[in-house]
Image (cartoon, rainbow, N blue to C red):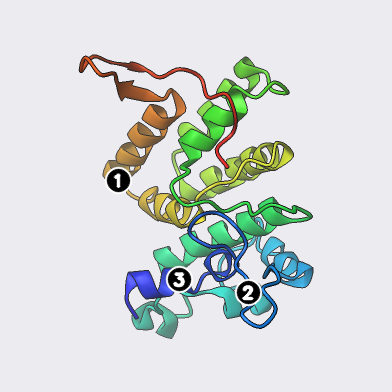
Amino acid sequence: MSDTDHRAQRIWNKYIAADGTWRRKESTAAEKRPPGEELAILRRGLSRPAGTVLPMFAFYTCPVDDFAARRGEVSAEQEAEHAALALFGLHQQSKERPMHRGGVSLGRAMRALRHHDRSSPEAVDSRFEQAFSATGPETLQFRLRGLVTQLKGIDQPLDYDRLAEDLYAWRRPHSRSRVRRRWGLDYYGWTQDRTGKAGPAAAPTTAPS
């Protein structure tokens, strides 16, 4: 199974279309939404290592590392996917709108939170900096839980495929630095204007939908 194939099987992609809306049932055109019991299973993975919550195995999609499995271990990719699944379960709980949206990186989502009228920019800066400066994946996962709770409070979606990739990359200093740079650019909206001059973009008026 290719990377694209296994990502397509993830729970958020099974229920949420590429445009960020709920998929429709073919027979009735009714919205397909993840059952509450499935989201509850995912939330059981919060602060738990990958492979220690039996019902979550049904939601893992990344290829099995046979060498690690023979030793009773899981791959780094599965650990990252586990964390993303658990955070999605928290984010989507009791929400009418889909909380996964392709292309909305953590930096972009936090930028929307920072400029939301119910947020304190200084407080959001501090919380994001704590996650940004995490030196290990376990610390990052713990701090992401607080950020996701805040994003949930303003109905701000997040790209969970990208988050899983970022969590995987966080294990290596060089790739961790790349993720940090991307998050920082997205958080401050750094872009080029039509004259070619670089600088922070204007604040978003609404959270990405």
Q: Amino acid at mark 2?
A: Met
Q: CA distance from mark 2 to mark 1?
A: 27 Å
Judged by depth in the image, the label closer to the viewer, 3 or 1, is 3
Q: Amino acid at mark 1?
A: Ser
Residue picked out by circle 1: 175
Question: Which residue is drawn at the image coordinates 69% and 55% (left, top)?
Answer: 92
**In the image shown, does 127 or 149 lie closer to the viewer?**
149
Residue 44 vertical placement versus 100 (above, below): below
Q: Amino acid at mark 3?
A: Ala
Name the disc covering residue 56, or none. 2
Observer-nearest of 151 and 41: 151
Find out whether the residues at labels 3 and 2 contact each other: C-beta distance under 8 Å: no
The Cα–Cα distance between marks 3 and 2, rounded to whole angstroms, is 17 Å
Q: Earlier in the sequence, mark 3 or mark 1?
A: 3
Q: How many marks?
A: 3
Q: Residue at x 75, y 66 (%)?
A: 40
Q: Residue at x 53, y 51 (%)?
A: 101
Mark sitting earlier along the chain (2/1): 2
Instruction: Please state, as top left, top right, bottom left or bottom right, where the C terminus lies in the image.
Output: top right
Q: Quadrant of residue 12?
A: bottom right
Looking at this view, is 79 or 154 the one in front?
154
- Judge whether 146 appears above or below 85 on screen: above
Label 3 and label 1: CA atoms lie apart by 24 Å
Q: Quadrant of residue 124?
A: top right
